[in-house]
Amino acid sequence: MTCILLTGSSRGIGAAARTALEARGAKVIGQSTSGEGFGTLAADFRDPDAPHQLWDAALRQAGGEIDVLVNNAGLFDPNPIDQSDEDWLQGWEQTMRINLTASAQLSRLAVRHWIERGTTGRIVHVASRAGHRGDSPAHWHYAASKGGMLAMHKTIARQYAANGILSFAITPGFTDTAMAGDYLDSRGGEGLLADIPLGRVAEPEEIARIVEFLSLDAPPSLTGATLDANGASYVR
């Protein structure tokens, strides 16, 4: 049975991914800030020690071996540039810690875990279209965090493929979650859909299917790849 540590598992893409992975027979250890729900561990990534504590708790729950890490947890709070210096910096650093630093800490622990045991492993990074094309004037920090995640993903893929450690990334555009819904409302609602040739935002289940594929089925030669899922609103 494949054991997967999935962050941000309580709602949206994470909840849909958990359902998809468990339907395939995987053992999923989830994470949320509060830890609500069966098989879900509490970890508040604003705390620098939380990722390490989460990893240790997940290893105990997994019986000592984790096969896949899915970095899905994220924060998407606006951070306008006309805030005070202190508030703007606090917003920047909190988003970086949750979206990028915690993912880096967990990825490091996972890579070390697999190397020490001489086993293969997979990391799936749920990044964002914003990591390629940027985002709104109030979301510099979010775009930068996801761009950093993509750079980290590429580095892991290139450096550890010979060890059988694979890295994949997904860059969704707008997805029908509470987080994206608030953003759409703040930017004019349905008018923003004009930027999406598909004419709609993605469903969480669509992104979850990609998470499932990369976690369980993707061939090793796909390591290093970034899969876009944005309705052709950004093409490379």
Image: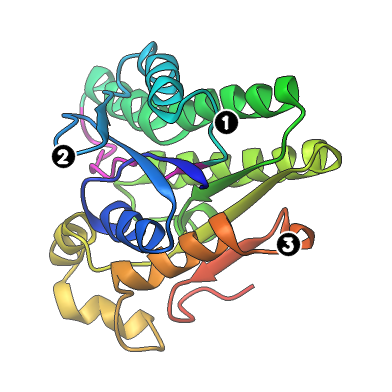
Q: Position of residue 217 (x, y in %)?
A: 61, 64
Three-letter code for the amino acid on which mark 2 is drawn: Gly
Q: Quadrant of the C terminus?
A: bottom right
Instruction: State which tag comes first along the sequence, 3 or 1.
Output: 1
Image height check: is 215 above or below 23?
above
User: Foreground residue, 23 or 218?
Assistant: 23
Any mark on residue 107, and which?
A: 1
* Residue span colored magenta: 69-83
The crowding category of the residue bearing disc 2, from other C-alpha atoms within 10 Å (few below 14, some 14 to 19, many at least 20), is few
Image height check: is 8 above or below 26?
above
Q: Main secondary structure of the magenta part?
A: loop
Q: Residue at x 40, y 66 (%)?
A: 207
Q: Is residue 140 left or right of residue 46?
A: right
Image height check: is 56 above or below 70?
above
Q: Residue at x 45, y 77 (%)?
A: 233
Q: Position of residue 75 (x, y in %)?
A: 29, 40
Instruction: State which tag comes first along the sequence, 2 or 3.
Output: 2
User: Foreground residue, 220 or 47?
Assistant: 220
Q: Report the mark closest to the observer, 2 or 3.
A: 2
Q: Is residue 47 left or right of residue 101?
A: left
Three-letter code for the amino acid on which mark 1 is drawn: Ser
Label 1 SS: helix
**Residue position for label 3:** 222
Instruction: State which tag comes first along the sequence, 2 or 1.
Output: 2
Q: CA distance from mark 3 to mark 1?
A: 18 Å
**Residue position for label 2:** 37
